Amino acid sequence: MIVEILLWAILPAILISIYIAKKDLFPEPNKAIASAIALGFLIFIPHEIFFIFFGEYYWSIYYNSLTDRHFINLLESFFQAAFLEESLKYLVFLFFVSKFNAFNEPMDAIVYGVCISLGFSLMETLQWTNSVYFDEGASAALFEAKSRAWSSNTMHAGCGILMGIFLSNAFFQKKYNFVKLTLALFIPILLHGFYNFSIGRDAAILSILLLLFCLGLILFGWKKAKNRQKLKMMENEDKVISINFFNISLVIFLNFMLVVGLINILR
């Protein structure tokens, strides 16, 4: 059963990434796809370091002083999960993946955005499945792996599509680039946060609706990018922006403040 658990935990994210990559009219190199998935996988390291050195100590002190479960769920969903995870994906894209020689047209942002997101989803699924395996046994772990195969992967892929759409416009169109860079992070945070929040409230119907919304985004974003590709005679397009550390820091800070404001509104 362990082999079956591992297959359900690992294969779906990899197969979805490969499928999306191969549907690209100008397919990305296998090495670039594998690198994007691996970078998403490795995001889990700084993610866990954050929780070990910050979350486990400082946040535990703060959480222990709280009695409002609704507020705790908001913090965990929108900050601890959505803001932190999407920010790490965003930074990996901008400072590593955008430097790939193969990143040379708008569709590439969507393909790599999905690969990074699903690489992270793969590692997250392995962690959760491992935890369930030792706490509740093999049968529960298999159920966890199967459920996350369609739920978590769909949500993360949807976030990757959204991030990729806005980043493709920021890199290859000249207008409102700072706004696009900001939305490329904030919109995935919103989707991720509301999805986690609905799970925390055991709102199954809302969770399913959000997953269907993610599927719709995947289909819409993919169709739009494919239609744009069909009008092209050649692959390469010139990037219109370069990554500026100050601007990206400002985007992260602005999104942090937006998340704080959103949490206070929903509280």
Image (cartoon, rainbow, N blue to C red):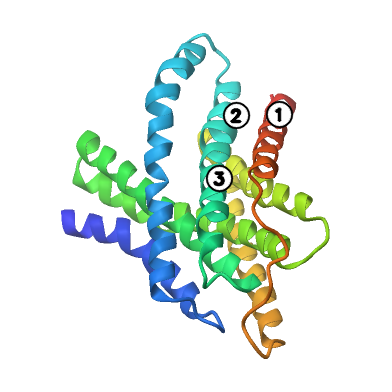
Locate residue 114, reporting x and y percent: 52, 62
Q: Quadrant of the C terminus?
A: top right
Locate residue 73, reporting x and y percent: 55, 28
Name the mark on residue 266: 1
Residue at the (58%, 63%) spot, across then down: 215
Task: In the displayed orientation, state which residue is furthest to the top.
Answer: 65
Locate residue 174, reporting x and y percent: 80, 64
Which comes before the other along the chain, label 1 or label 3?
A: 3
Three-letter amino acid code at the position of disc 1: Leu
Q: Nearer the viewer, residue 55 or 266?
A: 55
Please say whether residue 148 is visible from this viewpoint: no
Residue at the (67%, 91%) spot, across then down: 233
Three-letter amino acid code at the position of disc 3: Glu
Q: Secondary structure at mark 1?
A: helix
Which comes before the other along the chain, label 2 or label 1?
A: 2
**In this rendering, the label closer to the viewer, 3 or 2:** 3
Q: Which residue is mark 2?
A: 74
